[in-house]
Image (spheres, rainbow, N blue to C red):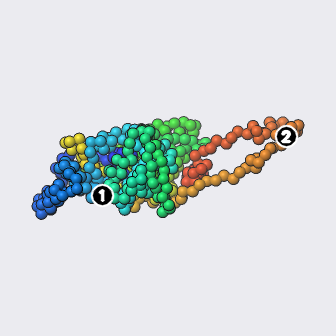
Amino acid sequence: MLALPFSRTLLAASLALCTVLSPYALAEHGDDESKAALPLDDLRTFAEVLDRIKAAYVEPVDDKTLLENAIKGMLSGLDPHSAYLEPEAFNELQESTSGEFGGLGIEVGVEDGIVKVVSPIDDTPAAEAGIEAGDLIIKIDGQPTQGLGISEAVDKMRGKPGSKITLTLVRDGGMPFDVEITRAAIKVQSVKRQMLEDGYGYLRITQFQVNTGEQVGKALDKLQKDAGGKLNGLVLDLRNNPGGVLQAAVEVSDHFLRKGLIVYTKGRDSNAELRFSATPADKLENAPLVVLINGGTASASEIVAGALQDHKRAVIMGTDSFGKGSVQTVLPLNNERALKLTTALYYTPKDRSIQAQGIVPDIEVQRARVTREQDDDFAGYKEADLEGHLGNGNGGADKPSKDKKARQERPQDNDYQLNQALNLLKGLNITRSL
């Protein structure tokens, strides 16, 4: 079974975990309710509405368009994540597993009929333009989004790389403002690593792609090497990670767990019920682990956070996650189209459903800006800068301000949540050593 990513594209509406099944797999195993006779009165009403539209609508509409719109409405009326995928959208869904696609680089959903940013993707035009999780997109190129279907909104935001688009946003209930963004062909680097300080590593996953599990394994090996053989602790950053491939989330969790259940799914059909367990290996060798989450942490990333939290393998820090706990199954049709249908809910090892609730961090740390006080040598010279100054009595080298090396900025210097995660890691490492 091939696990596909959760969304139509990274501009798509839903944060889902997808699998691909035969178009008849669910029907063959459905319950008696699904085999009940079709309601003839409702079908007559449908046919009557179709006939009235064809006869009286202000412009002629062909049967194919009407029927496809009816299918879209049928799927969109179920939940925010089920959808009818036309050929282009179906291809984009499959291509997005490689991490290369066109667009702005945002994951969006619909809230009260308005398009809402779930998460901007790192190193994309949307992130560079300053778009934030929770922003409401009220206009696209001057056209209101109120009442637009998610597919229509996505289509409006798509376009050729290099072309510009203007989004009108509302943030935190403030006044609307415009942001002009240049579309690009987006290549998302799923995994990023860096040493924070000697012995302490930082690993960020921006989304879960097919090869993310493998990339995380290699990144951990490299961090261990950079730390001289073994890390004293690691920060795993899942903030603003909209999710992705289910199998990748399982593989990432498995890098930090030695045994036990990682995640399981439950649905009406037996094909939608899956269980994944850890293998006996821990890349960190049980070194302290802190996982950062926020409101943009969704779907597959919530699986990782939930599994590590339930097994008490990591301290979860930040703010409540998004709460996307449903599974979408991609059912290919015979006309190069597909259904993306919600078929199950996933559960953490301790039987928690995250749907509409999210992961609650063990330690809540709100987003804040770190500011550094100006140091004493900002305003002028040091003694060593003065011409004819005396040398050091012990023979030490002079340290004039003009020779002072600029302090290299580290990720934690301007990120309060990350700074607090590093402080916690140091404390956990000291406690472990006692």
The percent position of residue 362, horizontal first and vertical second, equals 49, 59
Amino acid type, callout 1: Asp
- The spot of residue 277 in percent (x, y) is 36, 48
Q: Identify the image quadrant of residue 184.
A: top left
- In the picture shown, does residue 28 fall above or below 396? below
Say which of 268 and 54 sits in front: 54
Local crowd size for mark 1, using a 10 Å CA cut-off: few (<14), some (14–19), many (≥20): few
Point 34% across, 39% down: residue: 95
Q: Quadrant of residue 211?
A: top left
Judge from the rendering whether residue 165 lies leftward or rightward of residue 384; answer left or right: left
Q: Earlier in the sequence, mark 1 or mark 2?
A: 1
Horizontal relation, residue 3 to residue 23: left or right: right
- What residue is pinned by disc 1? 79
Q: Which of these two is toward me, 130 or 98?
A: 130
Residue that badge 2 annotates: 386
Using the rendered view, name the quadrant where residue 206 is placed. top left
Image coordinates of residue 337 in percent, x first then y, are: 24, 44
What's the residue type where badge 2 is placed?
Leu
